[in-house]
Image (spheres, rainbow, N blue to C red):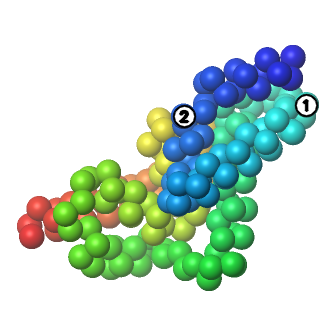
Amino acid sequence: MREERFNQINNEFSKALKRICASYEHNEQKSLELYQDVMMAIWQSLPNFKDESTLKTWVYRIAYNKSITHVSKEAKSNKLEFNSLEDLEVSVESNQVENQDQLKVIQGILMKLDPIDREVFVLYLEGEKQSDISSITGLSESNISTKVSRIKKIISSVFRRMDNE
């Protein structure tokens, strides 16, 4: 039963989990290690899954928790600083975004977000409903709506500035 459920999770969610891990860790090797940590945590937690939430929400919650732990450890060891949403727009104005395709620009913006904002937006990009994002992150639905709206505005303003240059 455990093995079957794990294989189901791997088949249904591996691509999304890899994207989530990549949103927290841009180093390809470290992102793969984070993904492996997430899958290990899922395997270890499978006996505790009680169908109180959807399997998808439960899996994403584990990925979220492992990713936050990873970012915290990396921040302590590398003294990384995360910008708030309000500070992000100013920090992206540098020439870093010149001559990059749209995906790389968006990835760059996401990497500058604090971990909670990044997770909310990545889950939004994965097509999750606000209620599910709320269950995964513990944030209110109105807070999620506000964060998504602000991030979309930031991304739009960055692209408008790039078009004007």
Q: Residue furthest right?
A: 47
- Residue flagged by tag 1: what amino acid is it? Pro
- Residue flagged by tag 2: what amino acid is it? Lys
Residues under numbered marks 2 and 1 in contact, where contact means CB atoms less than 8 Å apart? no
Across and down, in percent, residue 70 comes to 69, 62
Picture mark count: 2
Across and down, in percent, residue 29 comes to 58, 55
The residue depicted at 64 percent of the width and 75 percent of the height is: 75
Q: In this rendering, is residue 2 above or below 159?
A: above
- Asked if residue 131 can be seen in this view, the reply is no
Across and down, in percent, residue 86 comes to 41, 75
- Asked if residue 40 can be seen in this view, the reply is yes
Label 2: few (<14), some or many (≥20) within 10 Å? few
Q: Which mark is residue 47?
A: 1
The residue depicted at 32 percent of the width and 51 percent of the height is: 103
**Residue position marked by numbered label 2 in the rendering:** 15
The residue depicted at 61 percent of the width and 49 percent of the height is: 32
Could you tell whether 23 is left or right of 138 in the image? left
**C-alpha gap between disc 2 and disc 1:** 23 Å
Label 1: few (<14), some or many (≥20) within 10 Å? few
The residue nearer to you, when weighing 117 against 6, is: 6
Numbered disc 1: secondary structure: helix
Based on the displayed image, in which of its 4 quarters is residue 54 positioned?
Answer: top right
Q: In this rendering, is residue 71 above or below 39?
A: below
The residue depicted at 40 percent of the width and 57 percent of the height is: 107
Q: Which mark is residue 37?
A: none
